[in-house]
Image (cartoon, rainbow, N blue to C red):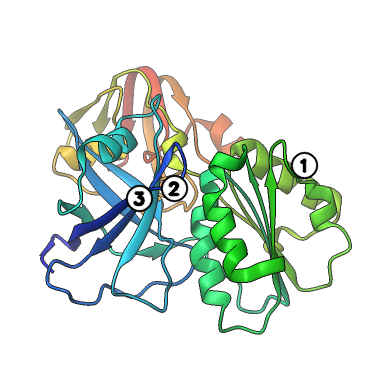
Amino acid sequence: MSQNNGTLNLRVARIEAVTPEIKRFTLVSPTGAHLPAFSGGSHVVVLIANQQNTLRNPYSLLSSPYDTSSYQIAVRRVDSGRGGSVSLHDTVAEGDLIEVTPPVNLFPLIKQARLHLFIAGGVGITPVISQLEELRLSKVPFELHYAVRGEEHAQLGKELQATYGEQVHLYRKGIESRLQIGRVLADRPLGSHVYVCGPDSMIDATLACARDLGWTDSHVHFERFLEQSSGGEAFSFTLGRSGTTIEVSPDQTMLEAVEAAGYSMPYLCRGGACGHCETAVLELDGELLHSDDWLSDEDKAGRQKIMPCVSRAKCNRLVIDL
Ligand code: FES
């Protein structure tokens, strides 16, 4: 397995369509070596070269943490997105090499939990799959509540039902009744933790419901997806330490533009959730377009911080502390 700048070059061993929109990619080392270990809920970042830029999209690993002979990712095609998922769907074939970063886990299981509750929608099931695999050897009970738009989107859920039986509750639109988040969260024993991943509306509803039912924030965990971002208008900004001006194209993030210019900055999630890329704003003539879940409303109103992995600006001048 070759490595460039810490990334892994992996061979695409298999591509399967699991729903009309989602393809599952199985990745292996070209040399047959085992891949770096990971835990349930981890993701890798896939580097995808398009015409002008290299996009870096995070995808959850859905293979078993107990089997590092391969990784699996599931890619939902987003035609209105920045082009990364479309490129993976349309141009990558079995046998090709793709470059990914080693796994990072920002959505781990809580070891002290006495009950794990998972709520997922659509492609949001992907981090949960490896979390459930990790729980296979655990005696801690869990339940998965998984909502999909209909039978043709249910394959991953049916695979999980075949493996975990009644612990998996599938809500196919038009077949089962609707997922009632309030019922899932009500009257749970002390020490329960809930994990939610799916559309923003599902995450927001779960957070609100948990708050109303008196769950403590530290027992409620969520992960949002960058692929829902659709880019924005081009703009430019300046690095305060070197004076370098950097152009951000419509399909690029600020972080990707910094990297394309040969600079680096800290990151982990590339999705506005982990806080690693938080950067101070030194000068601003215009407005910041915040898209992250990290900064508080107060921080956003203060105009002195930005998360370059997801946020943009509409401005005449922006100088950041880098
Ligand atoms: S890299 Fe995680 S918030 Fe930006």
Measure how far apart labels 3 and 1 are at the Cα level: 28 Å
Of the pair 174 and 272, the residue shown nearer to us:
174
Mark 3 residue element = strand
Is residue 8 shown left or right of residue 175? Answer: left
Q: Looking at the rendering, in which quadrant would you find the N terminus? A: bottom left
For discs 2 and 1, the disc positioned in front in the rendered view? 2
Residue at mark 1? 178
Marks 3,2: beta carbons within 8 A: yes
Q: Position of residue 288 (x, y in %)?
A: 45, 26
Mark 2 residue element = loop
Q: Position of residue 67 (x, y in %)?
A: 37, 77
Say what amino acid the circle numbered 3 marks: Glu
* Disc 1 packing (10 Å; few <14; some 14–19; many ≥20): few
Say what amino acid the circle numbered 2 marks: Val
Residue at mark 2? 18
Is residue 42 shown left or right of residue 98? Answer: right
* Disc 2 packing (10 Å; few <14; some 14–19; many ≥20): some
Residue at mark 3? 16
Q: Residue at x 32, y 20 (%)?
A: 317
Q: Is residue 253 visible?
A: no
Say what amino acid the circle numbered 1 marks: Arg
In the image, residue 146 sits, relative to residue 293, either above or below, namely below
